[in-house]
Image (tube, rainbow, N blue to C red):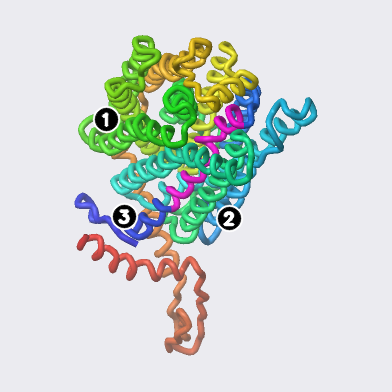
Amino acid sequence: MNKEITQENSRIIKTYTPAERNVYLVGLAGQNIMYNVVNACIMYYLQFTILIPAMAVSIIFTIARIFDALNDPIMGTLVDKTRSKYGKCIPYLRIVPIPIMIISILCYVSFGFYGDGGKVMNAVIIGWTAFTYIGWGVLYTIGDIPLWGVTSLMTESQKDREKILTAARIVAGIAGGAVMLSMQPIALGVGGAIASKFGLTAADGEKYGFLVVAIIISLIGTIMFQLTGFKVKERIAATEKTHLKDNLKIIIHNKPYVQLLISGVLGSAKSIINIVAMTIVSYYFASKSPIMTFVYMGLLGGGLFVGMFAGMGFAPKLSEKFSKKHVYNASNLIMVLPFILIFVAYKIAPHSLTAPVWIAVCFVLFAFAGAGTGALNVLQSTMIADCVDYEEYKSGRRPDALFFSGQTFLVKLQSGLATIITGIAYSIVRFSDARVAEVNAFINAGGTPRLATEYSNFMMILFLVISIPSAISCLLSVIPTWKYALDDKEHAKILAELIERRRQREQAALDEVFEGITEDNGETVVDGETEETGNEEVIIEETADDAAIEEAPAEESQEAETSTEE
């Protein structure tokens, strides 16, 4: 393992190797590929491909997300209580990728179109949707919490932890963004080819196109994700086990962590843009053309992701000059104006946002919105990791998985609340089931919805829902963190104290081993070798922990040299 030697105290700090970091990032990319197979496309598939009513989809998603979010502390507690020779996070990372792949594919298995088979078939379609989506959420949680939680166990170095979390957010954004931008146009293209080859309707072809693409992408993501469980190591020893009741008390009494959670909940509407982006491109800009969908997803989604990656890259550098709290709050506030201007642009040119000048304007607005989102993604992860250190400093307990389950909790709760807002908005203008089928038929007949007066309310609601609620959410998000309770300077002192405590525990363990070696008038047998000391024979059995302790100094010395060379 690499070691970072601090100039202040010349103590060796345990950290990950470059190879281990790279494998972790590959696995994280795979997990985000799998995540976005469902997260990015399933709502569109259910509502606009197999025509389940908007409110039904919203209710299913909201119930599933809230149910799953409430399970996150339970899963975090389970991970923190896990003890194995591989650590507490690694066992889950070894077993969960394949089950996630299976349930992700099942989400795109359909028994037909809603409304075509009567009430019983409609109930079967909705029941299957609820079953697969809830199951996917539960399995995803089992993988996601240890995947992010292990980052705080891979290194003791604050600098290295920030580096890997920043890289992780960037890689996750690239992998997830690639799926988000490409899966729908590819599915539409594959669906068109299937329909032509087998003489199916465009709707049937689209349905099977999503299934085929989901299978291929899920398989790729699974292969990548599986690597993490076999190549990543945990280096920080687990603290004492805690129970769910104790963990809930830990959460409640950790003020900075509670502030982050409340801020995340108040910012839920910001995730509406991820839910509606595919729909707005398909119906307003591209009229469901596979090629034009790909083009506009690249132009508009590209702006969002360019801004996001820029925000992720600059956030750590800004945090070196300003406190994380200030950068976090500024990132929220910087998104307010771009979100509002998106709707203003639509009101100015409701039928002509496809013109090059307006595409450029939308690109810039989406880029600024993405920059704030990217910065927040990085800062949220690093600030949660800081809260873990704060808790270990206060109570001696290190709830890595529990606290990172809060990150998963926020993603799910935000998505659930954003979905219900979207469903209500669609229902108000009746952009649902039979009317969606009508618009689809209009498009298949060569029509362009953005130019049709009868569908102007549908187009308007798409722009309204991604702008105004998001802007309000950005303002609300800064209220809990305006007086954030964990200052960066205080955290630096806490981290130094924690490293000192760990070294004292390690030294105490070494002292205990050496005190157990008794040299008297007999033989002392250590590690299988016999040394003559007299007439008595003392045999010391080496445990796995003792072996690890004895091997550590040589390994640390060699790797410290490696770190110094680097």
Q: Position of residue 535 (x, y in %)?
A: 49, 89
Q: Using the rendered view, name the quadrant where residue 127 is placed.
A: top right
Which SS class for mark 3? strand
Marks 2/3: CA–CA distance: 30 Å
Q: Amino acid at mark 2?
A: Ile
Q: Nearer the viewer, residue 501 or 365?
A: 365
Marks 1/2: CA–CA distance: 39 Å
Q: Which residues are magenta?
A: 27-49
Q: Main secondary structure of the magenta part?
A: helix
Figure check: 386 above or below 229: above
Q: What residue does disc 2 label? A: 95
In the picture, measured across the screen, residue 339 lies left or right of residue 406, that is: left
Q: Position of residue 327 (x, y in %)?
A: 29, 28
Which SS class for mark 2? helix
Figure check: 63 above or below 28: above
From the image, state whether disc 1 or disc 2 is nearer to you: 2
Residue furthest right in the image: 120
Residue drawn at x 64%, y 44% as measured from the top left: 106
Q: Amino acid at mark 1?
A: Ser
Q: Is residue 383 visible?
A: no
Alpha-carbon neighbours of circle 1 within 10 Å: few (<14), some, or many (≥20)? Answer: few
Q: What residue does disc 3 label? A: 13
Q: Position of residue 47 (x, y in %)?
A: 60, 27
Figure check: 217 above or below 204: below
User: Quarter holding the C terminus?
Assistant: bottom left
